[in-house]
Image: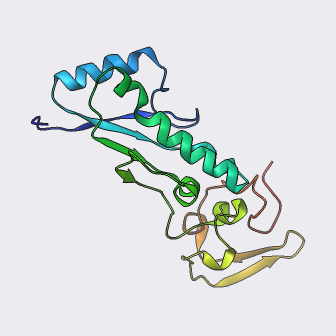
Amino acid sequence: MTGDAITQIEIDCDGHRGGLKPDAPELTAIGRVLHDARCLDGVLAHAGESCFAFSTEDQRLAAKNERDTAAESLRAAGLPVDTVSVGSTPTAHAAEDLTGVTELRAGNYVFFDLVMAGLGVCQLDDLALSIVVTVIGHRPEYGWIITDGGRMAMSRDRGTANQPQTAPGPKPE
C-alpha cells in the first residue's frame, strides 16, 4: 500500500454495533473505492452480542463468526484485506482459531468487569481495577452504600443490569 492514509471498513458481524453487514451490497463498492484510492487496509469487527453469550460454546461460536465474517465479502470480490482486526473480551478468551486475524483488540481483556464475571469469562477475584472511595452513608432498605466517589467515578454504565452478576441493589426499571 502506498497511499498516505490507511482505512479499515467496520463490519457488523452480529447486528449490534456500527459498520456494514457482511452481505451489504455497498460493502464491496466501498472496498473498491478505497482500494482504487490505495488506502484500503482491511476490516475490523466487534462481536457485541458475545456479551450475551452465557456459555463457553456460545462465546466460541461468536468468536468464529467474528473471525469468519470480517473479511470474507471483500476477499470474495477480489479485494486485498491485509488487516483483519477483531475484538471483544468474551471472544478473545474463547477463540480457538484466529487464522487470518492480524489484530485482536478486546476492550477490558486484561481488567475484566462484572459483565465478564457474569458470563463466566472470569471470576470476581480476577477483576483487576478498583476505585478507592469513602463510605459516607447508606440506604439499608436498598442494600446501598453512599460514597464520595460520585456517579462518574463508579460508572453510569448499567451494562450489568441484565447479567447474572451485578452490583447489589435494585435493578433499574
Q: Nearer the viewer, residue 168 or 29?
A: 29
Q: Position of residue 23 (x, y in %)?
A: 49, 21
The percent coordinates of residue 137 (x first, y second) are 75, 80
Image location (x, y in percent) of residue 130: 57, 78
Residue 19, image quadrant: top left
Q: Quadrant of residue 95?
A: bottom right
Residue at 75% x, 56% y: name it.
Answer: 163
Q: Residue at the spot x=42%, y=30% of the render?
A: 72
Quadrant of the frame with the N terminus: top left
Indicate whether 145 appears above or below 81.
Answer: below
Direction right: furthest residue: 141
Residue at 74%, 67% in the rendered image: 167
Residue sitting at x 51%, y 57%: 92
Q: Is residue 16 shown above or below 35?
A: below
Image quadrant where residue 132 sits:
bottom right
Relative to residue 64, is residue 34 depicted above or below? above
Q: Is residue 30 above or below residue 155?
A: above
The residue closer to the viewer here, 134 or 34, is 34
Residue 41 is left or right of residue 164, and the answer is: left
Residue 159 lies, in percent from the top left, at 66, 54
